[in-house]
Image (cartoon, coloured by chain):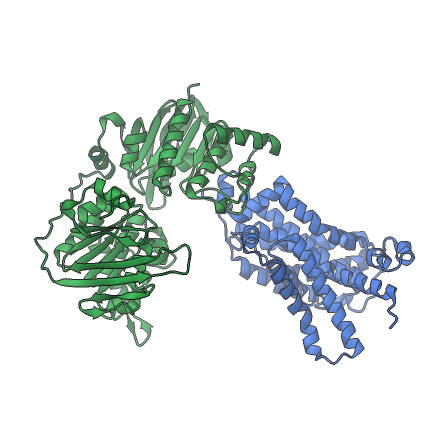
Chain colours: A green, B blue
Amino acid sequence: MNTKLKVSKVSKIYPGCIANDNVSLDFKSGKIYALLGENGAGKSTLVKILSGVINPDKGQIFLNDKLLKLKSPKDAKNNNIGMVFQHFNLFETLSVFENLSIDSEKNNDQLRILVNNILKKYNFKINLDVPILNLSAGQKQKVEIVRCLIRNPKVLIMDEPTSVLTEQETEDLFFSLKKFSKEGILIIYITHKLKEVLSLCDEVAVMRKGKVVSISRTIDEKLSSLANKMIGESLNKIKKMTSNNLSGEQILRVSRLNFNSEDPYEVNLEDINFTLNKGECLGIAGISGNGQNELFQILSGEILSNSGSIKFRNKEISKLNPKERREYLMAFSPEDRISQAAVPSLKIYENVALNNFKTSNFFERGLFNERKIKDHSKKILSNFSVNTDNVNLTSQFLSGGNLQKLILGRELITSPELLICFNPTWGLDVGAINYIHRTLVKINQQGKSIILISTDNDELLQLSDRISVINKGKLSKIMSAEEVNPEKLGLLMGGGLVD
Amino acid sequence: MNIDINFIGILIGAIMASSVPLILAASGELITERSGVLNLGVEGMMIIGAISGFALMVITDNLFLAIIGSMLSGLLLSFIFGFLTQSLLTNHVASGLALTIFGIGLSAMIGKDFVGIPGKEFPLLFVNLKEAIPLFGPIFFGHSVVFYFAFLLPFGTNYFLKKTKIGLIVRAVGDSPVSAANQGINVLLVRYCCILYGGAMCGLGGAYLSLIYTPQWIENMTAGRGWIALALVVFATWSPLKVLVGAIIFGGITILQLHMQAMGIRIPVQFLSALPYIMTIVVLVIISRDSRKIKLNTPTSLGQIFYKEK
């Protein structure tokens, strides 16, 4: 069965933003199509139009040369268009089976047989009678996929499906998608991850600022060519100059740090020792959940270690809280931008005022000096090229990349001596990652020090002067960046190499 | 001491009768809240149900019309709430509080002409069985049709939520209206229906007071029962059968403490009056302490304003 999906001159305009500008695309079954673009390029808008969640202002969609009227998600479903959203559309408190049965016309017994057949066919292991909130992200996604498969989809749209998956889950997903494609389902794969496009998809359409800027076969593309198309300029490869600006002056010494937690979900840290020099970037690699969270929190003062010392510029700081540590010119950028670093419902300038350095004088006799904070915030927005100059904007309307720029800007504008950041580029698109990497290199060159805790090995190898690996709460020997390569890092992360 | 077995039967029957308005209002509100809507106007809808039922009874001399009218008036009031919160996207809490204040005021105004008018006798079912069977007779028989309806309602509600497709859809909307809309469910329609149903049940609960329980109109005669019903829903962790348990305990201790006061037991009256509130909360907290169940039963989107993307 051949399926042809045609998007013809679709436009969608929001106040102040053209989300889709005359988008035309052709899809045929048997292939996996990538829709590539940065955050805010208009991919999600197009997907919402295809799934009937929103209606386009102009343009048409044809399925097998028949004009589709997609007024609501029901219409898309009835035309066998299946959709797996980036943020799962599942009901957390209902059981897996209840989630599947809610939009099915079949009776429960028939449906159960059908679902069990699907689970068996694709080797999905999901218990149908547990509530969704007990499932892992990968399992939830499988539930979403099964929900589409129940309706014999002709088209399956996946919106950034790997953003919440582990590496193993991602591999499983790719395997399934290839299988679906062989069975004649047309697959449209939306992503901003270049590697996934090359490893999974047959054709790629690149979107930028609401427009389709390129359509090509993936075998004709390379990582760099796709990246250039996606951000519309060529990226300067960041070259880290090692050691020529290291003064050798020690700025931080962590010794015999131990942390034992009563919470079974936290990782215990064992005998952490390292030093950090002025102008140096120390990378800490590791598979997530090996104690990075705990290490970051102990270094920032959110939690205190059971024993050991942290000396920052020869002062013992291990018992100080984050605010006091900030006063010693340390700065922190936590992993979770939304819940730890910023309050999404506050305005930009309010978020800036949240971490009140002693030097900033935002408060006078307990009162908020709004003008001072706003001026200060404007400076951050322009210095760190956040794509708005409106300090009254509610922070949740910033994209991930811009929010991260704002947070880094807030931390860096007071010129701290040490920045500790945890996965600073997680979930960001290429352009934003590039900007943040350049910023980190720049502050190193200004003689400031960085501890970079990250699960992204490319990033670590690119930016670090020395690297250590954390595994089950223990740090490996600290190595200089030259003696580390991706293979060695991988072995250490898996605990395979003991030195 | 010779305890009259019939007295115990009558006492239990009275306890059950006194919990009827709570069961009705709380069961209605439970459905409303399960769809993610927090309507704090229960007290207002009950009192409006009470006065409109009584007024219709006086005017038409027809109890059936009075009962139907009380439900319609509760429904009408809840429609105002639904329109405000669902169509105009106002805050649930503020709109609900306003509804209660409005209902109490309006009922007092309408009720001015009906103070002091005696009520009409409401037909009771199975009266002969009540006399015939000792102990169980006065407990189970000789009650109004609304009484039986109220005691079946929590079981029906439970079945509706757990076993029917529409019940599943209501729970889904309460869990995540955005996901529900993306699945093609008409969230607004579901929520409106749940709000209107809740309003009708509150109206009926009010009418039970003014037509059956104490057949007369007294200003502010619901006396906070709407708030108790609201609290019952929460403390019963949105489970219909626990609402039933809670309502009976509340009604029971209310009646028992009155008897204790009458018997002259030397416990401060203030403490006895507070006892129903304390005991209901204690018991419901104890029977609902399974944190997993609480998580599964709590409508995640409760009180959140939902609007559809265009």
Quarter of the rendering containing residue A326: bottom left
Quarter of the rendering containing residue B54: bottom right
Of residues A442 and A166, the one nearer the viewer is A166
| Residue B161 in view, yes or no | yes
User: A315 left or right of A124?
Assistant: left
Extreme-top residue of the structure: A1
Of residues A342 and A231, the one nearer the viewer is A342
Quarter of the rendering containing residue B128: bottom right
| Residue A160 in view, yes or no | no
| Percent position of residue A436, x then y | 22, 50
User: A224 left or right of A81?
Assistant: left
Vertical order, B26 against A89 (above or below): below
**Number of numbered discs visible in the structure rendering:** 0
Vertical order, A374 against A32 (above or below): below
Placement of the N terminus of chain B among the 4 image quadrants: bottom right
| Percent position of residue B267, x then y | 72, 79
Residue at left 50%, top 42%?
A: B181
Of residues A356 and A451, the one nearer the viewer is A451
Extreme-left residue of the structure: A244
Residue at left 66%, top 59%?
A: B45
Placement of the C terminus of chain B among the 4 image quadrants: top left
| Percent position of residue B30, x then y | 63, 53
Vertical order, A272 against B270 (above or below): above
